[in-house]
Image: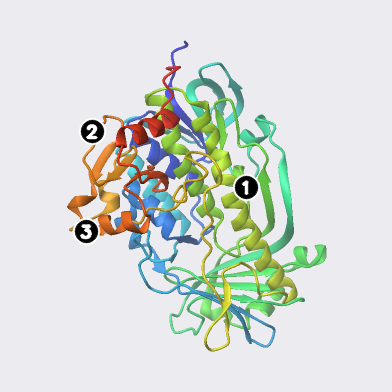
Amino acid sequence: MSVLDCDLIIVGLGPTGGVLANLIAKHDLSVIILEKENKLYNLPRAVHFDDEIMRVFETIDISRNFLNKTIINKGTRFLDEKNNLLLDWPRPKIITENGWYPSYRFHQPDLERSLRKNLSKFKKVSISQNSDVFSLKNKSNFVEVKYKNLKTNKVSLLKSKFVVGCDGANSFVRNTINSDLEDLGFQQKWAVIDVLLNNKKVLLPDRTIQYCSSERPATYCRNVGRRRRWEIALKSESDEKDFLKEKNLWKFLSRWVAKDDVQIERKTVYTFQSLIAKKWSKGRIFLAGDAAHLSPPFMGQGMCAGIRDVSNLAWKIAICCQNFHNKNLLKSYQSERYNNVKEYINTTMNMGKLLNEIGDTNVSKTVKNSNDGKRTMTSIKPSLGPGLGKKNDSNRGKVFPNMRLNNKRVDEYFDKNLILFSKNNYKNKLIKNISVQQFDTLSCALKKFNSEALIVRPDRYILSSTNDNNLNDFVDKTMLEVYNYKKRY
């Protein structure tokens, strides 16, 4: 086999690529990141993530420091044109099963700086900026990558075991593997205006407000520090050309703020779309994040979906790099992630219909009538799609809670591999075992899952469970599914 330059090449260093690099680096694998831009983009884009994503940040050791750059999100309210409440989506300030609050606001450049700073401690991670990838070729045991340095025009060739395209909506990697896009039916242009408050005394909502209207639907976001955002639907081509002009812009914003109250940090037009790539991989090349799917922003789940992608994919790639090649393990990436992300996108589209038409408030199955007669929803938590584990295992694909075990939380016991939680001790070099007899909370968890033992994946989902006391057979079958002994790199 040809001499390889690294285990993994990542195309694109946004949040998805940055999280993937950090996850892979924890396995002591070599990573080269090829980023087209010459420096970090320092203006707002993504502004929300949830408890599941904070748990991933905890996994890669950035949560504690990054937490200081965030605020807890109080929720979202949908109002009609007379400011009557149509639907309330509160985010209670309580710790979830993932060990964090349900919802956070942040400034994307702060996250990207945290991710890059953390990558700097790994000797086997290399970042190459000004690097435009223009050729990808699958070989039998590696991928050949060609890229051009946009400053010097020098062309270079690299070889790696795997390539993951985290290169956004206009993904070169997606085009290279000839993956068509499935259109779920939402496309609309919106203006996005980010501002900095000059005066903290300006009275603005302390949460997200969705202003539902058939004429001019809009969104207001309370972001970190002095940052605030408005998103406004553009209904025509002339609207798109003229809306961001000073006069028209302030005609809209004057409902909330005066010119002296804010400075405009960024104004642009986006096309909000609902798209999913039909094929997420070809050979040893994979897609993640916006390269694999696009969602309107009404749930704040676009970036979250990309981080869920790489949390699912990273440990599978790591196993294949360090142990044995397992096509079925890698194939489970798309099958497990596809339905999950599609449910988020469909729910977001329902919110878009409510925004545009003041339509049906039943945007998800979690919408209920509260005791005071209000329509209230709770956050959806789509399960994993089919993949690893038995279909008839009722615990398969559920999140294992990040509970407290004396002075530590469960996640502090996680390493890079699978964990077996069982009533009896069990030794196997491929799997870490924690006896639940040591911790009352773990014993209670096993009772909740009605199991004698559970195997939990590195991405914190339950892989398999059993009521059988024969752990040898249970573990062997799971190990055979995850670790393929037939072909070694």
Give whichever of 260, 56 is nearer the camera: 56
Q: Secondary structure at mark 1?
A: strand
Do the residues under discs 3 and 1 have CB atoms within 8 angstroms? no
Q: What mark, if any, has residue 427 been given in the picture?
A: 2
Q: Give left or right: position of 83 versus 125.
A: right
Q: Residue tagged by mark 1?
A: 293
Q: Residues within 10 Å of mark 1 (few under 14, many from 20)?
A: many
Determine crowd level at label 2: few under 14, some 14-19, many 20+ residues with C-alpha closer than 10 A. few
Looking at the rendered image, the disc whose residue lies closer to the viewer, 1 or 2, is 2
Answer above or below: position of 438 versus 237: above
> What amino acid type is highlighted by mark number 1?
His
The disc placed on residue 79 is: none
Instruction: Identify whether 230 is placed above or below 286.
Output: below
Asked whether the beta carbons under mark 3 and mark 2 sit within 8 Å of each other, the answer is no
Q: Residue 346 occupies which quadrant of the picture? A: bottom right
Q: Residue 376: horizontal and vertical position, in percent?
A: 56, 77
Q: CA distance from mark 3 to mark 1?
A: 41 Å
Q: Amino acid at mark 2?
A: Lys
- SS for callout 3: helix
Residue 149 shows in the view = no
Q: CA distance from mark 1 to mark 2?
A: 41 Å
Does residue 59 show up? yes
Task: Report the residue at 73% width, 75% height from top.
Answer: 359
Residue 221 is situated, as x and y percent measured from the top left of the image, at 54, 71
Label 2 SS: loop
- In the picture, residue 119 is in which quadrant? top left
